[in-house]
Image: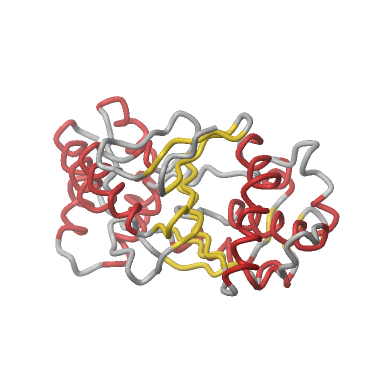
Amino acid sequence: MSPNEFTLFRQWVERHCSLALGEDKKYLLETRLARILTENQCETFLELYRRIGNNDNPALRDRIVDAVTTHETLWFRDEAPWDALRTHILPQLAKLAHERGEPVRIWSAACSTGQEPYSLAILIDDYCRTHREFPVSPDQFQICATDVSAPALMLAVAGRYDAISMRRGFTNNFEPYRKIYFSNTGSISTVSTELRSRVRFKRHSLQDSFAELGTFDLILMRYVTIYFSVDFKTKLWPRVRAAMRPNARLLLGAAETLLDQTSGLNLERLDRAYYYRLGPRVTP
């Protein structure tokens, strides 16, 4: 990939995915596009670029978007926020659902192959089975999971994972869930039908309007914005805030922070976990 070809694709990726690729990402971009180059019988990356520039091959554009998008994910990624969800946030949401009489809505953004929303569904089901202070059922929690990648969502909907995928994230705290919520056929583990029915997967880009998604009591947007350009993040956070219901929580990945355009979102701490909450600041 020549410097000129890299510049053209880098600009295209930022326009269509809002991903910021530094000069050090040239080799990464080249390796991710090499197979697509071969599949489409293009002799150069410039020829491939011209094909997507004609706007007459949406399937090819989607293929490139999928190739450059990071799909790194695992079960219960980072224990601290999941412990906070299990011990503090879920009981508060259960109380909200019980008092409000309508479902709590949760959004797992950039869910990739589904480990995050299914992890949420597992915690919710476990809470509903074992806690009776605020009697609620899993049906009182609606999980919306979105991603820009059609192939990733296809795998998420199937809920089938190989042995390597299953080993990633099931630490001692969460290991017992594997026997309860999965069936095994050879080396493949499949999420239970009941659990899969509780997650609604939808193809959606964070560049798109959030209006069709509605508003939420909890948003997980973890390890997503670290790849975005500063300009896009400046526009993104006010839109995320607008999708949050009063007192809603926003969980980001480790070391991810908001920008200045987030008036009303307060950083709060639960044990080892941090999250943002929409509403007046709570004094400890």
Query: Measured along the vertical axis of the image, is residue 150 above or below residue 17?
Result: below
Relative image position of residue 49 (x, y in whole percent):
20, 51
Residue 4 figure quarter: top left
Relative image position of residue 66 (x, y in whole percent):
39, 54
Q: Residue at x 68, y 53 (%)?
A: 91
In this view, the residue in front, 56 or 76, is 76
- The reply to whether residue 185 is visible in this rendering is no
In this view, the residue in front, 29 or 40, is 29
Residue 170 figure quarter: top right
Relative image position of residue 32 (x, y in whole percent):
39, 42
Q: Along the horizontal axis of the image, is 222 left or right of 141?
A: left
In this view, the residue in front, 15 or 35, is 15
Return the residue found at the far top: 24
Relative image position of residue 39 (x, y in whole percent):
37, 56
Give the total number of marks visible in the rendering: 0
Query: Measured along the vertical axis of the image, is residue 5 above or below residue 39?
Result: above
Q: How is the image coloured?
A: secondary structure
Q: Residue at x 25, y 35 (%)?
A: 1
Query: Measured along the vertical axis of the image, is residue 4 above or below residue 115?
Result: above
Q: Residue at x 68, y 40 (%)?
A: 83
Q: Residue at x 59, y 51 (%)?
A: 116
Q: Which part of the image, by quadrant, shows the C terminus? A: top right
Q: Along the horizontal axis of the image, is 188 left or right of 63?
A: right
Return the residue found at the far front: 283
- The reply to whether residue 175 is visible in this rendering is yes
In this view, the residue in front, 149 or 207, is 207
